Image (cartoon, helix red, strand yellow):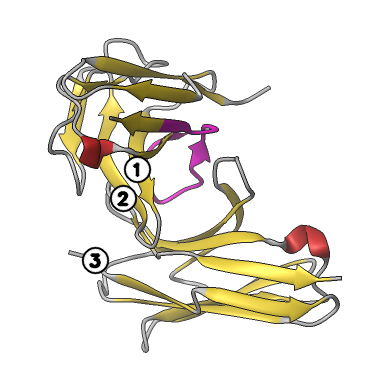
Amino acid sequence: EAQVTQNPRYLITVTGKKLTVTCSQNMNHEYMSWYRQDPGLGLRQIYYSMNVEVTDKGDVPEGYKVSRKEKRNFPLILESPSPNQTSLYFCASSHSGTSEKLFFGSGTQLSVL
Amino acid sequence: GENVEQHPSTLSVQEGDSAVIKCTYSDSASNYFPWYKQELGKGPQLIIDIRSNVGEKKDQRIAVTLNKTAKHFSLHITETQPEDSAVYFCASGGSYIPTFGRGTSLIVHP
């Protein structure tokens, strides 16, 4: 089954404790991206990747890092989380960019205390 | 950058009625306009999309219309059913950073 898998589903952490949210897709997609969803603000892109070792900033990249060492994986790293990063995070992928269907993961609800 | 406005933020209808959600965008270079449906506890899923060289597209009870001159596009759902209740997002694509509307919570009352 074609899917984007995110882990964990829920995460509670404390300020400053490094964390990683994993994302994996099994569709051989070149394009992968991360979004955060906040009430009343919709979905905002954090980072995206066009292919292995190619990443770039989205609209809200501050406080986040990503890496794309393998085509299927695109982890999101918060090296020093802060309470304003409490949000619902989604990973998404598509064959080659944003002019086509995005496949989203099920989301990761992060709470930073 | 691109700006996408979506209205209304909440829409309540009776089962069987039609629902219309509207979006406007600012970047005339945008060429791809998808609509996503997000059910509670799930990620958004594409329900229909339209490209800039087409004015209307239909898929059973769902249709999307695009007016490039006025820079707006709309989602039309006919004969609504309780399972249509969800949050709907429009988006504007064409670059590597899509811009999403803020979402419309559609409630269909049985």
Tell me the magenta residue range: A91-109
* Quarter the C terminus of chain A occupies: top left
Task: Determine contact: label 1, label 3, CB under 8 Å.
Answer: no
Spatial CA span between label 1 and label 3: 18 Å
Residue that carries the numbered disc 1 in the rendered image: A36
Q: Amino acid at mark 3?
A: Glu
Q: Quadrant of residue B42?
A: top right
A27 vs B25, left or right, is: right
Q: Is residue A80 magenta?
A: no
Seen as rendered, the residue at the extreme bottom is B70
- Indicate the secondary structure of the residue bearing disc 2: strand
Do we see residue B55 in this rendering?
Answer: no
Q: Is residue B3 visible?
A: yes
The image quadrant that residue B2 belongs to is bottom left
Foreground tag (3 vs 2)? 2
**Circle 2 crowding by C-alpha within 10 Å: few under 14, some 14–19, many from 20:** many
Which residue in the protein does label 3 denote?
B2
- Amino acid type at circle 2 is Arg
**Residue for badge 2:** A44
- Where is residue A101 drawn, in percent x and y? 51, 46
Which amino acid does the dot numbered 1 rest on? Arg
> x, y (%) of residue B13?
73, 79
Q: Residue at x 40, y 64 (%)?
A: B102
Q: Chain of mark 1?
A: A
